[in-house]
Amino acid sequence: MMIDQEARKHLRESLAKGIRYDGRKKDEFRNIEIITGFIGTAEGSAHVKCGETEVIAGVKMSLEKPFPDTPDQGILMVGAELLPMSNPKYEGGPPDATAIELARVIDRGIRESKSLDNKRLCIKAGEKVWTINVDISPLNDDGNLIDVGSIAAVAAILNARFPFVENDKVDYKQKTTEKVPINRIPIAVTVLKVGNAIIVDPTELEEQALDARLTVTTIDDGRLCSIQKGGVGTLSIEEIDKMIDLAVHKGHEIRKLIKQE
Amino acid sequence: MDYNKRLDGRDFDELRPMEAKAGVIKKADGSAYFRMGNTVAYAAVYGPREMFPKFQQDPKKGVLRCNYNMMPFSGAGDRVRPGPSRRSKEISAVTEKALSAVVDLSDSPNAVVDVYIEFPQTDAGSRCCGINAAAIALADAGIPMRDIVAAVAVGHAGNKICVDLNYEEEHLPDYVEGLDDKDVADIPVAIVPSTGEISLLQMDGIIPKETLIKALHKAKAALMQVNEVQRNALREKFAAVADEENGENIENVENGFEEN
């Protein structure tokens, strides 16, 4: 739903009083539900619901030639599309800046966490390594796609099992019990500044009223591995400090949820 | 040798297990989920809304625009590259035609009704599964239609007519050895159930004409079952909506009494 000036003003005034339209606290996420391993054609999959935002992530693995500068390392790639199915504001065609940012922020968060042991994905240096493709497809976008997409991507990677290989040929019909060598769980949490209010997990409406946002990806020990600022508004160092604390705290909560799955 | 027992144990006339649900995507004006065996489709309908690009507007009536898309992880083998392909564009076009047969958009000039069909998982017969989902979604969106189109693929494999082929049957000679007839014909069919008229027909493979006609009759019989599943999905959704509304009405009346 597109927001007009008056609606935006009202939403900002409400948030200034600490009121969210759906009754949540400012630092409260919507209810998160995670289902994994339900797509037979994928090596790993996750369906994440956060309020009314719903996304699917799937993992496909294949044997490819490594990049020349990293001949002994496997490759992890995360992609995301803004499917026109998920919201009337999206159109088909090549991805626009929003879609590219979504995919790249999630990809960087996972990549920079250094959680993946790339060398264990190498079959034969310079010739064959595993490429792990994670694709995120939103079903219904009611805000906060970055965080929900990142949860889905990580849950799908944890759910993935390598397919069988015979004579360098992948047999996708059979899965082994081998998991993706990942030793940390990166979680992206986007914190918004709307007026003077700091909130997490925005709905689509709240997203449209923001001044600035900060997506902070953290790893298990609370250190940060990637940050992205969005929006045209500015942030003071004190605000950034507060926003990161919140992201670390929320990241821990979400990590626990994923580990339960 | 002929193909005497189906690989998944079904009768030759038997459809794969089906599951359907209406109203699964909140942002959409109408939506549906349809599963045939391991093929899963979501359909979302947006519109009637203004048609862009403008040169595609029709001042006499609205336009139905379908978009078929496999999610990157939905194929049985390698990853499917995201974005449109020649295959997906063609399937979008035949899907559009299959559904346009019953859709009446004469009250919506210059408008478009967008139907987005997405597949998280496929195992043959995806265009038919997509059409089944799309037809429910269009009804859910309240788009004027004369009927709910139903689709299924019938095939001729190992000298047998098989209803609702799965992936293995589409490639039968790779899975069953010693077949005399190694030609597999795959025939997606969509019909308008109330008239029995066919709105989508494609065929790949080699098949005698008589067999094709027989296959079409089998498809028609199977499609009545598909249509029942579609109708039930809509009944379920709107029964739930009606219950909710009735519930609210009763509450309001009670509140009214209290205030008096």
Image (spheres, rainbow, N blue to C red):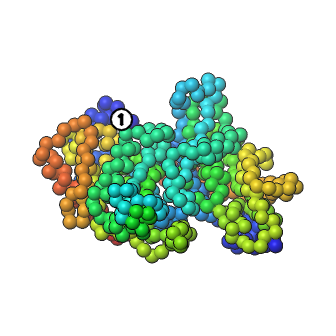
- Determine crowd level at label 1: few under 14, some 14-19, many 20+ residues with C-alpha closer than 10 A: some
B136 and B68: which is toward the camera: B68
Q: Give the farthest residue toward the left.
A: A238
The answer to which quarter of the image holds residue A10 is top left
The answer to which quarter of the image holds residue B227 is bottom right
A251 and B145: which is toward the camera: A251
Q: Give the farthest residue toward the right.
A: B210
The residue under label 1 is A3
**Image point 59% across, 63% down: which residue?**
B38
**Image point 37% across, 41% down: which residue?**
A98
Q: Residue A160 location, x and y as percent?
A: 43, 67
Q: Amino acid at mark 1?
A: Ile
Q: Residue A37 location, x and y as percent?
A: 47, 67
Q: Quadrant of the N terminus of chain B?
A: bottom right
Q: Is residue B23 above or below residue B14?
A: above
The answer for which chain carries disc 1 is A
Q: Quadrant of the C terminus of chain B?
A: top left
Q: Residue B240 location, x and y as percent?
A: 54, 54
| A202 sits left or right of A128 in the view | left
B149 and B98: which is toward the camera: B98
B195 and B191: which is toward the camera: B191
**Image point 53% across, 54% down: which residue?**
B80
